[in-house]
Image (spheres, grey):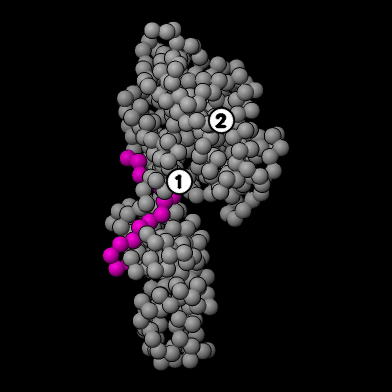
Amino acid sequence: MPVPASYDAIILGAGGAGLMCAAIAAGRGRQVLVIDHAPEPGRKILISGGGRCNFTNIGAAPDRYLSANPHFARSALARYTPQDFLELVAKHRIAWHEKTLGQLFCDGSARQIVAMLLDECAAGGATIRCNAPIHSVDHADGRFRVSAGEMEAEAPALVVATGGPSIPKLGATGFAYDLARRFGLKVVEPRPALVPLTLGGEEALFRSLSGVAAPVEARCEDAAFREAALFTHKGLSGPAILQVSSYWRHGQAVLIDFLPEVAPGWLREAKRQRPRVRLPALLGERLPARLADTLAERIGIAVELGNAPDRKLEEAERLLAGWSFAPSGTEGFAKAEVTVGGISTADLSQQTMEARKLPGLFAIGEAVDVTGWLGGYNFQWAWASGVAAGQAL
């Protein structure tokens, strides 16, 4: 058996978290090896933000993350902020712009972010090996031994940064969870997040609206998001729906306010001001025509507003302000941008991301039970958790 190459740390996964961790650790003089089975590093980065990478959000804060322990992310996020990442972006002269709701994107290409991370890794002398599927990971006598591709390597520290199972077409798997369980760490049941919802039964009639989008407020449990919703041939999508999907569980309703800007009593006021107008025409002034027609048909007020009783108009207002959908499911990990759940934060240090039960084992990024909102939050967690582990290696 060949003698394994020796390093200070082995990082499994060359995504955002893994590369950031490697850059920080290598910059501190550590000998670092990054291993990934994919043909190139940063594959999720490359497809994010329509190819321009929504690399952070200026509003990143612990309350914008889901976790069994909602306080776990606080320390890492406080120690590495969006402004810290922007300083790195400025150092590499990458032009960027802010879109809605604090979302920051490259002016050019997501490849600039990958190149930046690789340059930072190279500056510290980190070794990156792609096209190296992992055959085995073992631990004995305080050292981790990894067999991957054609190589054997060992180190006193191992960082699990292989992400979750979302977007399997990029090679994503549940490898991190299997490895964590092998080493005695708990795993919070993973499920698709930031994912379109499917509709069945009677609600499938809304599929006729496929391609129609409108600004709404979508709610599920205590979470509410005011962004666009999109009807698809399978159900519901768009930013507002992707956001609430992270909170949604089977059997729960998703409520949509189709007119979040209007004040209560607006229909009765319209009846007084414009008694001859009909509901489809009135809704069509604020919503796409096909959606307005479908909602009016479902509500069932066919007469001019002047001939509609106030109680019917009040009922219509209630429906439009809280239209209840009962999703039959989601489009699964294939269409999910991220994963809710993962390696339990109860088994990790929130300062260093190190496993409490096994010194030298770390978990970062999407592999951990910390999931951000849509809009750059998950990248900020990747950077922050990667830095936390990189500073501890």
Question: Which tag, 2 or 1, sits closer to the chain's start?
Answer: 2
Q: Secondary structure at mark 1?
A: loop
Q: What number is the disc on residue 23?
A: none
Q: In the shown orientation, is residue 315 left or right of residue 262?
A: left
Asked if one can make out residue 352 in the rendered structure from this viewpoint, the answer is no
Q: Residue at x 55, y 20 (%)?
A: 127
Q: What number is the disc on residue 337?
A: 1
Q: Whole-Å distance between the Cαs marked 2 and 1?
A: 20 Å
Q: Give the magenta-colored segment's residue range.
A: 189-203
Question: At label 2, which amino acid type do we have?
Answer: Met
10 Å crowding of disc 1: few (<14), some (14-19), many (20+) = many
Q: Is residue 373 above or below residue 90?
A: below
Q: Residue at x 50, y 14 (%)?
A: 7
Quadrant position of residue 218: bottom left
Q: Position of residue 58 (x, y in %)?
A: 60, 46
Which residue is under mark 2?
20
Asked if one can make out residue 51 in the rendered structure from this viewpoint, the answer is yes
Q: Secondary structure at mark 2?
A: helix
Q: Residue at x 53, y 31 (%)?
A: 41
Q: Is residue 190 magenta?
A: yes
Q: In the shown orientation, is residue 107 left or right of residue 280?
A: right
Q: Is residue 132 above or below residue 154?
A: below
Dot in front, 2 or 1: 1
Circle 2/circle 1 CB separation < 8 Å: no
Q: Position of residue 226 (x, y in %)?
A: 50, 61
Q: Position of residue 220 (x, y in %)?
A: 39, 58
